Amino acid sequence: MTRLLLIGPPGAGKGTQAVRLAESYLVPDISTGDIFRTNVKNETPLGKQAKAYMDAGDNVPDSLTNDLIRHRLEEPDAQDGFLLDGYPRTEDQVRELDEFLASHGAALDAVIELVADPDVVVDRLRKRAVEQGRSDDDESVVRHRLEVYREQTAPLIDVYAGRGQLVKIDAIGPIDQVTQRITSALAERGIAMPDAATR
Ligand code: AMP
């Protein structure tokens, strides 16, 4: 029963860490970015609505994103916990998530902030653009995404810090080391990985 959020600028390694944490804590890795990308690829109505925003590096409107996440969190696999990667990204999304959790008698265990210097992040994203060919990894779009993050998402960190839920992690370093930092910080807060016996 672990409910976690991963928050941090684009390129901080959220996706990479999310996969590992979801495996360790036995919860589904729910990435709104991945869900949107799949919808764009499959040319669904949602994908068609989201594509222009994503290509421009803007947030997809809250109404679409909140609908999507509400449905996803109602799925059976998310009832015993989840790891949200890339959601919430705006104050409106925080409100939506708060309401969802309250109406289900649930609460977040921790909000993990991946802290990374913007210059390092831009460099990482430049490499990812070459490796994965993501259309929103073009340099000017990347700079815009960082700006959107700074304006709309970074303020949420203070909200969660104020609630005593924030766990700040230095995201610069080898992947394994960053994972280790996260799991140790969570353990210090009493958030343990499920026992090997129950896996
Ligand atoms: P990500 O993979 O998290 O970097 O997301 C890629 C893109 O998907 C973002 O630049 C947004 O256009 C869109 N997106 C992902 N998550 C959200 C969200 N929570 N709210 C709005 N747009 C989102």
Image (spheres, helix red, strand yellow):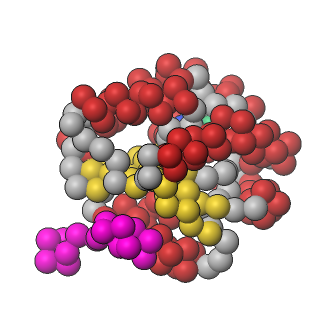
Instruction: Say which residue appears at 44% left-offset and 52% top-offset.
Output: 164
Of 51 and 146, nearer the camera is 146
Quarter of image, ligand 1: top right
Instruction: Say which residue appears at 21% left-offset and 44% top-offset.
Output: 79
Q: Quadrant of residue 23?
A: bottom left
* 191 inside magenta stretch: yes
Of 190 and 68, nearer the camera is 190
Instruction: Say which residue appears at 21% left-offset and 50% top-offset.
Output: 80
Q: Quadrant of residue 154?
A: top right
Stretch in magenta: 183-199
Query: Residue 115, how many percent across, how many down?
Result: 64, 61
Query: Residue 161, how many percent across, how many down?
Result: 52, 50
Task: Name the side, left or right, on which 60 lies relative to 131.
Answer: left
Instruction: Say which residue appears at 69% left-offset and 41% top-offset.
Output: 149
Task: Name the side, left or right, on which 142 lies relative to 132.
Answer: right
Query: Residue 130, how many percent across, how many down?
Result: 76, 59
Residue 143 visible here: yes
Task: Name the side, left or right, on which 121 lies relative to 101.
Answer: right
Task: Classify the position of the C terminus by image quarter.
Answer: bottom left
Residue 41 visible here: no
